[in-house]
Image (cartoon, helix red, strand yellow):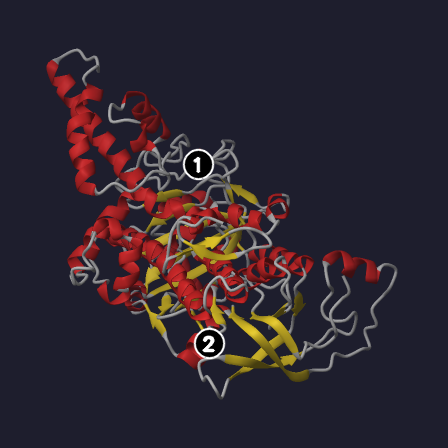
């Protein structure tokens, strides 16, 4: 493979603006289909980014583009699941169908268990600069041309069709040598063997314009198309939060010396204003942050700050930064995090960062010869680590629909519409789950109707209101709150021992314990429980009738908690597999996940 020219091309088949996870993934998928793909990335990789906790779906997505081995062998911290604690006065709860509660961290442990979904189903905690670099390099080896330090400054649209972008104007700063960029890491290495770059050569900034057949906007939160041209970004008022985080050394690990080691810890704050995260990384540091309601955080600025819970000299805040002090005081509301930091934990100087206005979506993510992917189109919240998942989902959708349009599987209009519906449906599923978590964390109802699109809700949660949209019934706040109450069961505090015990005694059948099974309407599940649960507890031996009655009651409650959790888990479990897009029809089409034939096919027609 010969390296691309030192300056960006005048024309490319697919131009991708942004080389983050969504952009690089889409580039890999398209290049492997034989398309001419070019990435413009404004930064020079590696570069910093937050968002270190990945869902297990990343395996499936990386497998499709041939990058799973590279991810697995990189050395990132394995993530067997997650520990989540919502209520400081109750035990922790687990968001996976088979939870694990074997770590004596407290009396109230809650764990998700990815391994229970399959022997090779763990995920990772990643340093994003390395993860993103890995994915960009894979795009290169797949055949994409990557131009770093290349900023898109303007998008021009067709005079015949003002909705169709046709060219991008850019600024590019090439390195002195070799041509920008290397075709692949191996080509880069061989071209430099035994040579030393001249430090006297100064890069010259150049400008130019590139035309394309298709455009993918992967510009992250900047969202070039959505914010500057389409102006269709909607900020979620119900998730108006501020995130403050930093990096620490010398901390403890959750689940040390057990198979739970490496699991991130997530914990609700004691004042119910938000939650905290604790994510160990493979360089020995730990990402520790808080996500707090913006109004609550701003209101506390006027109040006296509590003393810091940390004693290590590095946490003494020598610059007397009010922001750092506020970060420390907010962490004091997460006693589990404080215990994990320990007296030996120290703040890495200068690492405190913050972000606001990060929860948003858009009315559409595709149009005439363009697609919007990743954070450029939508982001929900750091909770539940859905960011990378949605980035890869939208990237694969963009690649498949562009291929479908080129290969004549459907019209470009239908392809773009399918992409919008795919992104919106996945987004809404995770959005409702995240909102349900916040309802539990804040112990109150918050109006969310203004942030949830009804059509997207109907696709994502049709089982909760069958036929409602066909009959003209409008989505109500009451219905949404019921959905949140259903989804929050995903985080019920159950243990693996409870799941094993139930699997051996349940008279309802093993289908009820299968997270891959179809969703069961809550009312039908209640009916089944009334019929079957008590049969499974009738064999329990006890010393008295009162003990038997107590045991039966506890057993029934435990069974309901487990089955409610598994049922709620089915909402997002399908999202954990890229192959789900092959079985979930949208607009009459499903994705065709076949290398060399990537695209869309009519639902029910197979490949």
**Relative horizontal placement of residue 389, taking residue 282 as reference (left or right):** left
Residue 480 can be seen, yes or no: yes
User: Secondary structure under badge 1?
Assistant: helix
Looking at the rendered structure, which numbered label has been put on residue 225?
2
> Which quadrant would the N terminus be assigned to in this image?
bottom right
Q: Is residue 602 left or right of residue 219?
A: left
Residue 409 vs 462, above or below: the answer is below
**On screen, residue 401 above or below 83:** below
Asked which secondary structure carries label 2, the reply is helix
Q: Which residue position is annotated with label 1?
A: 117
- Residue 179: give x, y in percent of width and height: 76, 71
Q: Are marks 2 and 1 in contact (CB under 8 Å)?
A: no
**Looking at this rendering, what residue extends furthest in the left direction?**
545
As drawn, the residue found furthest toward the right would be: 194
- For label 1, the crowd category at 10 Å Cα-Cα, with few meaning under 14, some 14 to 19 and many 20 or more, is some
- Residue at the image position 18 percent from the left and 55 percent from the top: 479
Query: Foreground: 248 or 557?
Result: 557
Which residue sits at x=18%, y=57%?
468
Q: Residue furthest bottom?
A: 159
Q: Answer with the quarter of the image where residue 32 lies.
A: bottom right
Counting residues from the start of the chain, the first of labels 2 and 1 encountered is: 1
Q: Is residue 34 left or right of residue 278?
A: right
Real-space CA distance between mark 2 and mark 1, rounded to the nearest whole angstrom: 38 Å
Of 561 and 104, nearer the camera is 561
Q: Residue at x 37, y 35 (%)?
A: 99
Q: Nearer the viewer, residue 176 or 211?
A: 211
């Amino acid at each position: 493979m010969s390296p691309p020219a030192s300056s960006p091309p005048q024309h490319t088949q697919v131009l991708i603006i942004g080389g983050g996870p969504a952009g690089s993934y889409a580039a890999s998928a398209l290049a492997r289909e034989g398309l001419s793909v070019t990435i413009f990335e404004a930064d020079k990789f590696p570069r910093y980014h937050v968002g270190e906790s990945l869902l297990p779906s990343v395996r499936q997505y990386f497998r499709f583009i041939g990058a799973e081995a590279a991810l697995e062998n990189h050395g990132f911290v394995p993530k067997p699941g997650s520990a989540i604690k919502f209520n400081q006065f109750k035990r922790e709860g687990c968001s996976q169908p088979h939870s694990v509660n074997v770590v004596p961290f407290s009396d109230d442990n809650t764990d998700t268990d990815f391994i229970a979904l399959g022997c090779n189903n763990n995920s990772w905690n990643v340093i994003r600069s390395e993860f993103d670099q890995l994915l960009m390099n894979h795009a290169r080896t797949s055949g994409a041309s990557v131009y770093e330090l290349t900023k898109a400054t303007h998008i021009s649209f067709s005079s015949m069709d003002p909705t169709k972008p046709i060219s991008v104007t850019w600024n590019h700063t090439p390195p002195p040598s070799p041509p920008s960029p290397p075709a692949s890491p191996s080509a880069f290495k061989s071209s430099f063997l035994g040579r030393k770059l001249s430090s006297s050569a100064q890069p010259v900034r150049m400008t130019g314009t590139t035309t394309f057949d298709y455009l993918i906007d992967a510009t992250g939160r900047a969202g070039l198309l959505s914010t500057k041209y389409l102006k269709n970004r909607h900020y979620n008022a119900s998730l108006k939060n501020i995130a403050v985080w930093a990096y620490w050394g010398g901390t403890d690990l959750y689940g040390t010396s057990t198979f739970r080691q490496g699991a991130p810890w997530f914990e609700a704050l004691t004042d119910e204003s938000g939650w905290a995260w604790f994510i160990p990384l493979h360089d020995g540091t730990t990402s520790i942050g808080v996500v707090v309601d913006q109004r609550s955080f701003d209101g506390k600025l006027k109040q006296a700050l509590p003393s810091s819970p940390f004693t290590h000299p590095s946490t003494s805040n020598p610059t007397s930064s009010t922001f750092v002090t506020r970060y420390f005081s907010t962490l004091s509301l997460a006693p589990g995090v404080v215990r994990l930091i320990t007296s030996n934990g120290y703040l890495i100087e200068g690492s405190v960062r913050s972000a606001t206005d990060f929860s948003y979506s858009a009315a559409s993510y595709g149009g005439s010869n363009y697609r919007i992917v990743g954070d450029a189109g939508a982001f929900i919240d750091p909770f539940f680590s859905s960011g990378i998942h949605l980035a890869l989902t939208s990237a694969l959708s963009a690649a498949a629909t562009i291929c479908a349009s080129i290969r004549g599987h459907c019209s470009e209009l239908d392809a773009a519409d399918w992409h919008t519906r795919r992104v919106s449906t996945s987004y809404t599923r995770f959005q409702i789950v995240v909102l349900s978590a916040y309802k539990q964390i804040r112990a109150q109802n918050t109006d969310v109707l203004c942030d949830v699109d009804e059509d997207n809700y109907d696709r994502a949660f049709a089982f909760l209101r069958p036929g409602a949209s066909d009959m003209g019934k409008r989505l109500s706040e009451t219905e949404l709150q019921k959905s949140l109450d259903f989804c929050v069961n995903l985080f019920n505090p159950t243990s693996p021992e409870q799941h094993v015990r139930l699997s051996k005694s349940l008279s309802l059948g093993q289908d009820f314990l299968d997270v891959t099974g179809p969703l069961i309407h809550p009312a039908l599940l209640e009916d089944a429980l009334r019929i079957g649960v008590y049969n499974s507890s009738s064999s329990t031996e006890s010393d008295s009738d009162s003990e038997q009655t107590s045991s039966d009651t506890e057993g029934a409650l435990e069974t309901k908690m487990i089955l409610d959790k598994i049922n709620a888990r089915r909402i997002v479990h399908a999202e954990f597999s890229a192959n789900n897009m092959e079985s979930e029809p949208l607009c009459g089409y499903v994705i065709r996940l076949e290398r060399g034939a990537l695209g869309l096919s009519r639902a029910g027609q197979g490949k």
